[in-house]
Image (cartoon, rainbow, N blue to C red):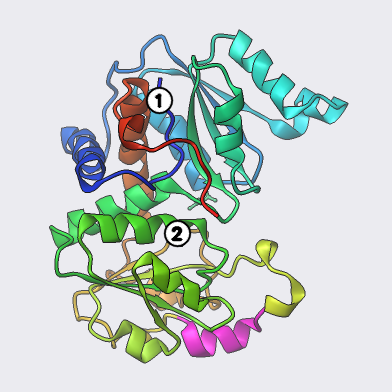
């Protein structure tokens, strides 16, 4: 069994394979994915130590559409409240012959930690760890871009907002640059878009009109206040005035530019309702595509097709 912890180390071929497989699930029934028996007899356990609406639900739907048995462990009512350690909880779940753990945790590196301590019989899928990585979110975003734009080469993509605390942005930057997007722009204030992000192969831009100029794709991110200390907390109204995606701001992008957001959206903070609900917005398509991408990742991980190209379980600095 193979883990799916990060996109780092995965090359264009394997990322394209994930997209192709996800596309094949979608095209079986267009936007509604049909049930297939690829994980029949397997047990997938959702372990969400941090809140989620989209990721947890679409992982559950994906596993069920693959015919797996799915357990959603309610962490708040589990025996961890009686003092049981994380590793003891995991050992008990392993003893129930679980095949996969889908893990969301507020600590960066949590999925890697679990992968290092579980038996080799369980595959670990990272559903978002701290500010480190959210690999399936980035892949459903790539599928959404490819289904709308046809290819990655030649595209200009702006990622706007709280880049500093965003695991989504980190995974997206890797996916975009690996798949052939040369113009990736990170747009936001200096406090939320530090200059060292340029090392990832993106251009830093602190001015919204320059950042959105002529782009094909605008990805908006919310302010992750739960990961901010007081000094970093921007005023919401000031942030919206400078970096909010309004109809005027969207007019700086290409006329056919699409608007994306991983959710949850905060209307009037990073995006206006007019833009979020407009026909330029593909935000809900992203959610639908998440089912197919998670089906692809679960099935490829189970058959060992993913980690062959990953250097190991190491967590990046
Ligand atoms: N995009 C995303 O991870 O949303 P949830 O927190 O609802 O899973």
Point 45% across, 59% down: residue: 170
Which residue is identified by label 1? 2
Point 61% across, 40% down: residue: 110
> Regarding mark 2 in the picture, which secondary structure is present there?
helix
Quarter of the N terminus within the rendering: top left
User: Which disc, if any, is residue 170?
Assistant: 2
Residue 129 placement, left or right of 246: right
Q: Position of residue 206 (x, y in %)?
A: 45, 87
Q: Which residues are magenta?
A: 233-244
Around disc 2, counting alpha carbons within 10 Å, would you say few (fewer than 14), some (14 to 19), or many (20 or more)? many
Q: 55 or 280: which is nearer to us?
A: 55
Q: 121 or 221: which is nearer to us?
A: 121
Quarter of the image holding residue 116? top right
Furthest toward the right, the residue is 82
Quarter of the C terminus within the rendering: bottom right
Residue 292 part of the magenta-drawn span: no
Point 55% across, 68% down: residue: 164
Q: Position of residue 32 (x, y in %)?
A: 27, 38
């Amino acid at each position: 069994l193979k883990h799916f912890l990060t996109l780092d180390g995965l090359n264009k071929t394997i990322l394209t394979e994930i997209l192709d497989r996800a596309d094949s699930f979608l095209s079986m029934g267009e936007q509604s994915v049909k049930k297939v028996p690829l994980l029949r007899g397997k047990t997938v356990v959702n372990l969400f130590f941090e809140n989620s609406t989209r990721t947890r639900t679409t992982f559950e739907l994906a596993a069920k559409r693959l015919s797996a048995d799915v357990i959603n462990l309610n962490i708040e009512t589990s025996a961890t409240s009686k003092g049981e350690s994380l590793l003891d909880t995991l050992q008990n779940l392993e003893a129930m012959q679980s095949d996969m753990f889908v893990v969301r945790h507020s600590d960066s590196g949590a999925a890697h930690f679990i992968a290092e301590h579980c038996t080799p019989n369980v595959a670990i899928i990272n559903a978002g760890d701290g500010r480190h990585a959210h690999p399936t979110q980035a892949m459903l975003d790539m599928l959404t871009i490819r289904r709308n734009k046809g290819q990655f080469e030649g595209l200009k993509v702006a990622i706007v907002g709280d880049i500093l605390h965003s695991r989504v942005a980190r995974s997206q930057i890797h996916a975009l640059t690996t798949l052939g997007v040369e113009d990736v722009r990170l747009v936001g204030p200096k406090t939320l878009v530090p200059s060292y992000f340029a090392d990832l192969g993106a251009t830093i831009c602190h001015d919204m009109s320059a950042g959105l100029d002529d782009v094909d794709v605008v990805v908006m991110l919310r302010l992750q206040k739960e990961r901010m200390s007081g000094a970093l907390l921007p005023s919401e109204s000031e942030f919206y005035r400078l970096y909010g995606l309004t109809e005027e701001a969207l007019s700086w992008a290409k006329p056919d530019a699409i608007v994306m957001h991983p959710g949850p959206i905060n209307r009037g903070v990073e995006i206006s309702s007019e833009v979020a609900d407009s026909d330029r917005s593909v935000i809900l398509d992203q959610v639908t595509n998440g089912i197919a991408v998670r089906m692809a990742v679960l099935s490829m991980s189970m058959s060992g097709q993913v980690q062959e190209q990953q250097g190991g379980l190491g967590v990046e600095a």
